[in-house]
Amino acid sequence: MRTNKVVVLTLTTRPRSDRAKSRFYETLCRELEESCGITPSDVIVSLVTNSDSDWSFGNGRAQFMTGEL
């Protein structure tokens, strides 16, 4: 059951393994509970995965692909 402290996070990320995602979810919930008093059942996370070619930080260039970033 959720409380009125529910947190919904949508994060954009590069591809990650299922293991890395699981560790992230666990760490996030632990830190939010310890630091903010938010129970793990109140944490909803959605990861949106994309690749380097999906990003441009301006000037008509794909800086991840060109090595600028």
Image (cartoon, rainbow, N blue to C red):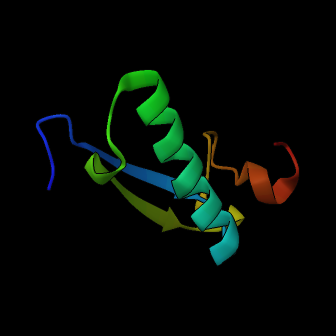
Q: Name the residue furthest top.
A: 35
Q: Quadrant of residue 14?
A: bottom right
Residue 16 seen in render:
no
Residue at position x 88%, y 51% from top? 67
Closest to the observer, 61 or 36 = 36
Quarter containing the C terminus: top right
Q: Is residue 35 above or below residue 33?
A: above
11 left or right of 15 in image: left
Picture coordinates of residue 15, whole percent (x, y): 66, 70
Vertical arrangement, residue 37 with respect to residue 10, above or below: above
Quarter holding the N terminus? bottom left
Nearest the viewer among 13 and 40 is 40
Q: Residue at x 59, y 47 (%)?
A: 27
Task: Count numbered badges in the picture.
Answer: 0
For the point 75% across and 49% down, the residue is 63
In the rendering, at what x and y percent does residue 52 appear? Answer: 70, 62
Foreground residue among 10 and 20: 20
* Residue situated furthest right in the rendering: 67
Tell me if I can see residue 4 in this picture: yes
Where, by quadrant of the figure, is residue 57 drawn?
top right
> Residue at image x 47%, y 52%?
11
Query: Where is residue 22 shown, x and y percent of the image?
Result: 58, 66
Asked where in the image residue 38 lies, by quadrant, the reply is top left
User: Is 60 drawn above or below residue 19 in the view shown?
Assistant: above
